Image: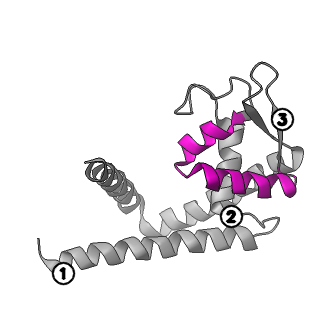
């Protein structure tokens, strides 16, 4: 493989990170915003994370509830990052945490009304943004990008695992 292609691929990765940062800034600056893409993803995970959607058996079977461990698995971030994010979301009253009565070691995370409203607004904002991006890219290029990114992540995960 030519070194130019390696450099181009590495540059594209950093350039992609720039795009995700721009999306995060868009959400933070949007009307009713003030939340990052990662935080919105966490709230979305809490809203929809159940036994079918989460990659862990610890996920709650109740709607609008999830566990710290389930979020760690689903969002693919460190437990420390989840803890820090949850602390921030709780302080800003998007979520509430309580100890599971059946298993005192498990903390149940629930969206507050403010959290539910924020998820709904964030989804609408992201839907509108993605619609505009798809219109500009074209459906064929957008689908091609998704396929390539999925394949890229698959290959990277296989290579990193060894």
Of badges 3 and 2, the one in the foreground is: 3
Please tell me which of labels 3 and 1 falls first in the chain: 1
Please tell me which of labels 3 and 2 falls first in the chain: 2
Badge 3 is on which residue? 98
Q: Residue at x 74, y 25 (%)?
A: 62
Mark identifier at residue 149: none
71 part of magenta stretch: yes
Q: In terms of secondary structure, where does tag 3 sit?
A: strand
Q: Is residue 36 above or below residue 19?
A: above
Identify which residue, 131 or 66, lies in the foreground: 66
**Could you tell me how far apart the alpha carbons at marks 3 and 1 are, in whole angstroms?**
52 Å
- Using a 10 Å C-alpha cutoff, classify the residue at mark 3 as few (fewer than 14 neighbours), some (14 to 19) or many (20 or more): few
Which residues fall within the magenta stretch? 66-94
Badge 2 is on which residue? 36
Q: Could you say where residue 129 lies in the image, as x and y percent from the top left?
A: 61, 64
**Could you tell me how far apart the alpha carbons at marks 3 and 2 are, in whole angstroms?**
24 Å
Q: How is the image coloured?
A: one colour
């Amino acid at each position: 493989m030519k070194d130019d292609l390696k450099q181009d691929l590495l540059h594209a990765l950093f350039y992609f990170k720039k795009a995700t940062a721009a999306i995060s800034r868009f959400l933070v600056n949007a009307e009713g915003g003030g939340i990052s893409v990662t935080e919105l993803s966490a709230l979305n995970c809490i809203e929809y994370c159940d036994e079918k959607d989460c990659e862990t058996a610890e996920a709650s079977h109740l709607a609008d509830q999830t566990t710290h461990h389930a979020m760690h698995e689903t969002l693919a971030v460190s437990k420390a990052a989840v803890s820090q994010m949850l602390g921030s979301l709780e302080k800003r009253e998007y979520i509430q945490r309580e100890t599971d009565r059946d298993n005192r070691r498990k903390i149940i995370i629930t969206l507050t009304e403010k959290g539910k409203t924020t998820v709904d607004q964030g989804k609408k904002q992201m839907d509108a943004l993605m619609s505009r991006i798809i219109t500009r890219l074209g459906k064929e290029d957008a689908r091609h990008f998704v396929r390539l990114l999925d394949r890229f992540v698959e290959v990277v995960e296989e290579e990193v695992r060894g």
